[in-house]
Image: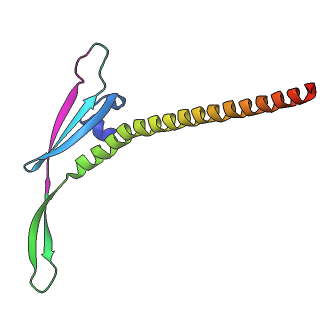
Amino acid sequence: MYDNLISLGITNPKQIDRYSLRQEASNDILKIYFRKEKGEFFAKSVKFKYPRQRKTILANPGAEKSYKEVHEISPNLRYVIEKLDQICHGDKIEVDIKQKILGDLRHLEQVVTRKIAEIEADLERLTAKDKS
């Protein structure tokens, strides 16, 4: 599943915490950060340099055809980023769902507490009415 990451020498993709991507001249620099181990001050990271792909495209499709050169992200890097997004954002989605469930539970707790108080107040009124 993570063949592109394994080909980079990353043997345990589940240890990946986050990544950054930046462009320097005609290269894309990918930096992958791993989760900190207990007792470490800094998280380990690895850096990879990908040359940008050069393409010549038609700039003006009119009568006078002119071409221009563009630089774009390498297809290999695109696949690696896709897998990194699955790893990094998958954890975030799971945390968001956990937070939503906890929020729903707290809300339900408040609703039940109010309803119990309302029922107890009704019982008190009934008891007070019976005594009079």
Colour scheme of the rendered structure: rainbow
Which residue is most to the bottom?
A: 63
Q: Which residues are magenta?
A: 40-53
Nearer to us in this view, 121 or 8: 121
Task: Answer with left or right where residue 89 lies relative to residue 9.
Answer: right
Count of all numbered marks drawn on residues in the image? 0
Residue 108 falls in which quadrant of the image?
A: top right
The residue drawn where x is 41% and y is 35% is 91
Give yes or no for residue 75 being in the magenta stretch. Answer: no
Task: Answer with left or right where residue 45 lies relative to residue 111.
Answer: left
What quarter of the picture does the C terminus occupy? top right
Q: Residue 60, relative to residue 96: is it above or below?
A: below
Residue 2: x and y, percent? Answer: 35, 38
Q: Residue 75, relative to residue 116: is it above or below?
A: below
Nearer to us in this view, 5 or 104: 104
Is residue 128 shown to the viewer in this render? yes
Which residue is most to the front?
A: 132
Residue 3: x and y, percent? Answer: 32, 39
The residue drawn where x is 58% and y is 32% is 106
Nearer to us in this view, 4 or 47: 47
Give yes or no for residue 52 being in the magenta stretch. Answer: yes
Residue 66: x and y, percent? Answer: 8, 76
The residue drawn where x is 16% and y is 80% is 61
What quarter of the picture does the N terminus occupy? top left
Residue 36 falls in which quadrant of the image?
A: top left
Is residue 9 shown to the viewer in this render? no
Which residue is most to the top?
A: 39
The residue drawn where x is 50% and y is 34% is 98
Residue 79: x and y, percent? Answer: 29, 47
